[in-house]
Image (cartoon, helix red, strand yellow):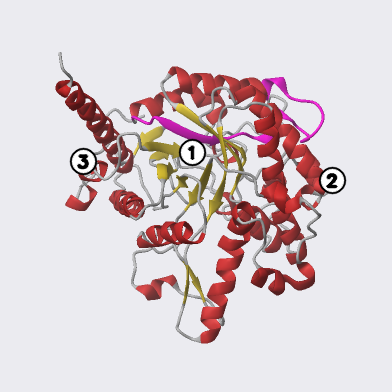
Amino acid sequence: MSANPTEPLLAPAQDPERIARMFPAEFVWGVATSAFQIEGSVAGDGRGPSIWDTFCARPGTILDGSDGREACSHLTRWESDLDLLVALGVGHYRFSISWSRVQPNGHGPWNDTGIAFYDRLVDGLLARGIKPHVTLYHWDLPEALQQRGGWQSRETVADFVGYARRMGALLGDRAATITTHNEPWVVATLGHREGIFAPGLRDRRVAAQVSHHLLLSHGEALTALRADGVRSQLGIVLNQAPVHSATALMEDRAKAQLEDGELVRWYMDPLLKGAYPADVLEHLGADAPQVLPGDLERIRVPLDFLGINYYTRNIAIAQGAYDPSSSGLELTDMGWEVYPTGLTELLTRLQRDYRLPPIYITENGAAYPDQCIDGVVHDDARVRYLASHIEAVAQARQAGVDVLGYFAWSLLDNFEWAHGYTKRFGIVHVDYRTQARTPKSSAVWYRALQKATRERSAGVVLRVLDREPS
């Protein structure tokens, strides 16, 4: 870690004290990571292979030909990474468990070494005053389960429930929250319909069935965890965005309606209304998933919270492809529009259409082509991105949406899935050759925001004490 992380060049709109005043003292500020993207040590300590290990080994699947074998070496550097969280003033840390690290085949014997790692990690967080937020599944299914049919098979639902119960017994007395799935849309659509993520299948019918089994496993796991007496708050994380039509043409508006159904309503409706959206079912036709009697009741179980991951809006166009540069908006290194008002739009729309549980923004961030020069990383564009999106959260709260917290994606530059190591989302720069960590300007800014919130909280307490009679 750099001894002198750079101070960002702030405009008034990014003043952390100004933004802190928009939130209550108890608002949660955190950062997020995922196991396969940072841990490394994929073949050590009894871990079994995951579908992402298999996918990375196929030629042409990863942009730079890389894999997750080393990533950020978090498995061996976890203690210094937790110390880094302390140095950055982070009070909440969202991470995922590698299923194949704790249960190599996804069923059957458990790996005590892997289990002990997450036990130490959670204790290490608590010892440093940081609250753990655990995700059970962030896309890395054990390869042995994929060989048995993966999420296409209803057996995997039962396997996931068994895994969730074991992790609940291990961590449920200490974790602030437990999330079942991170972004089931990505698993189903990018992994099973478009084939650009693991396991690399291209079958619309299979993808629809996978999405149903992911939701079913979520509902079954929450029911089991509650029956087991797990004390953590329980929920699921969805990636969502407002879908705008590229033009006012009828065919573009119809495409936007369908894409909204596939991205938002296909997951929100069964979770909170107990049914799949009729228009998407009609569109799927014979490819619609097999839903057994009682499945939708099992999916629609109470949520303690709903996690929302937001990066940009979606643009729907019936013919051809939308060119983001045509909008005139700033673009990130992923080619995504910087569109913070979309987060307010999304949250207020969800509040209008559903009876929502409390919300966490569980991922929000941007990739930029950061360079570490003389131990300094200037990423003022990321500071602008984070500040504008956090203010969008404040506007949604003012409109009545119950948002409890915000997690920046990501703590570290890491393995960015099909993009390999070519995209950097971290607020901390990682030199993949030396594994050196260098906080960027955005890390310094985010630390100041959290500090301003804490100082505001302390000021409220002092003012209350001052009013107390002696």
Q: Secondary structure at mark 1?
A: loop
Is residue 57 visible from the viewing direction of this image?
A: no
Report the front residue among 149 and 306: 306
Q: Is residue 409 left or right of residue 234?
A: left
Instruction: Tell which of 440 and 389 is nearer to you.
Output: 389
The image quarter containing residue 48 is top right
Q: Which residue is mark 2?
A: 148
Count of picture labels: 3
Q: What is the C-alpha distance between the residues marked 2 and 3?
A: 53 Å
Magenta stretch, residue numbers: 89-114
Say which residue appears at 65% left-offset and 72% top-offset.
279
The quadrant of the image that shows the C terminus is top left
Task: Please tell me whether mark 3 sits on a helix, a strand or a loop.
Answer: helix
Residue 425 falls inside the magenta stretch: no
- Vertical comparison of 86 with 155: above or below: above
Q: CA distance from mark 1 to mark 2?
A: 35 Å
Residue sitting at the far bottom? 249
Q: Mark 3: few, some, or many residues within 10 Å (few <14, many ≥20)?
A: some
Q: Are marks 3 and 1 in contact (CB under 8 Å)?
A: no
Give the labeled residue for mark 1: 432
Q: Which residue is mark 3?
A: 17
| Residue at 71% across, 73% down | 282
- Residues under numbered marks 2 and 3 in contact, where contact means CB atoms less than 8 Å apart: no
Outermost residue toward the top in this view: 470
User: Helix or strand or loop: what does disc 2 sit on?
Assistant: loop
* Marks 3 and 1, how far apart at CA: 34 Å
Q: Amino acid at mark 3?
A: Glu
Q: Residues within 10 Å of mark 1 (few under 14, many from 20)?
A: some
Query: Which of marks 2 and 1 precedes in the sequence?
Result: 2
